[in-house]
Amino acid sequence: MKTIEYFYACHSVYAYFGAWRLAEIADEHGAQVIHRPFDFNPVMAAAGGAPFNARPKPHMDYFFGRELMRWAEFRNLPWIMRRPTHHDNPLALGNGAIIAAQEMGWDVHALSRALLQAHWRDDADPADSGTVAHIVEGLGMDAETLVTEAMSDATREQHAANTKEAIARHVIGSPTYFVEGDMFYGQDRLEMVARALVKPFAHFRDHKA
């Protein structure tokens, strides 16, 4: 079975916009999605990315303004039309819930989508245990068990390992997908992900100048 390694953070708007299309692609090609939530700020710092508050206004207006409006319309997904109130809160709980659900064999795909949508549609805080529990309960899952596991030592270690691996593999943003080790950054590359599941792209070394 082909796999799609899915590196992202639970507060990522572009992960939100791509989440349903990713699921469609996986189903269409019989591929397994492996969720690898990571701590966003250390990965961005390692990649040389400027903090959001240090980026030029035209950049922010385009990539986190006009582009969000386009993609929300294109994907037919609701959003709050602004930066969420709790967007800068720690990611350990939300990311940890996804990691724990995957480890326990629960429906990690549904949980991931629900967390992303709650943040960008409902202004939910992924760092608040009551909020996460409410989202989990809405999916018919055991909220107490999942929230406990999300903050366990084992989950924290996996979160740190995902973050370390994202840095080592030169992930430059959220979401980033890997197919057979080939990296695709951004949900606007999902059609390339779909194609790579059928026919891998040639590597640079396979081309001659």
Image: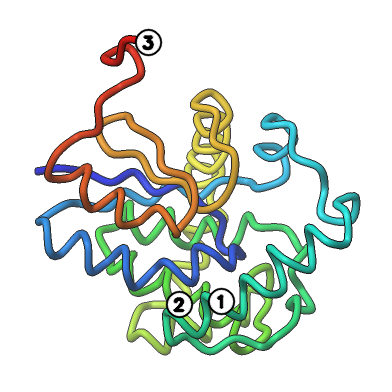
From the image, which quarter does the C terminus lie in? top left
Q: CA distance from mark 3 to mark 2?
A: 56 Å
Residue annotated with mark 1:
132
Q: Callout 3, which amino acid?
A: Ala
Q: Callout 1, which amino acid?
A: Val
Sequence-earlier tag: 3 or 2: 2
The foreground one among 206 and 15 is 206
Q: CA distance from mark 3 to mark 1?
A: 52 Å
Instruction: Say if mark 3 contacts mark 2, CB within 8 Å.
Output: no
Residue at coordinates 47% horizontally, 58% vertically from top-left? 149
Residue 10 disc label: none
- Position of 208 with respect to 54 (left or right) is left
- Element type at marker 3? loop
The foreground one among 133 and 175 is 175
Q: Callout 2, which amino acid?
A: Ala
Residue 209 disc label: 3
Residue 112 percent across, percent down from the top left: 43, 68
Sequence-earlier tag: 2 or 1: 1
Q: Above or below — where is 182 with respect to 177?
A: above
Sequence-earlier tag: 3 or 1: 1
Residue 111 percent across, percent down from the top left: 40, 72
Labels in figure, total: 3
The image's colour scheme reads rainbow
Q: CA distance from mark 2 to mark 1?
A: 8 Å
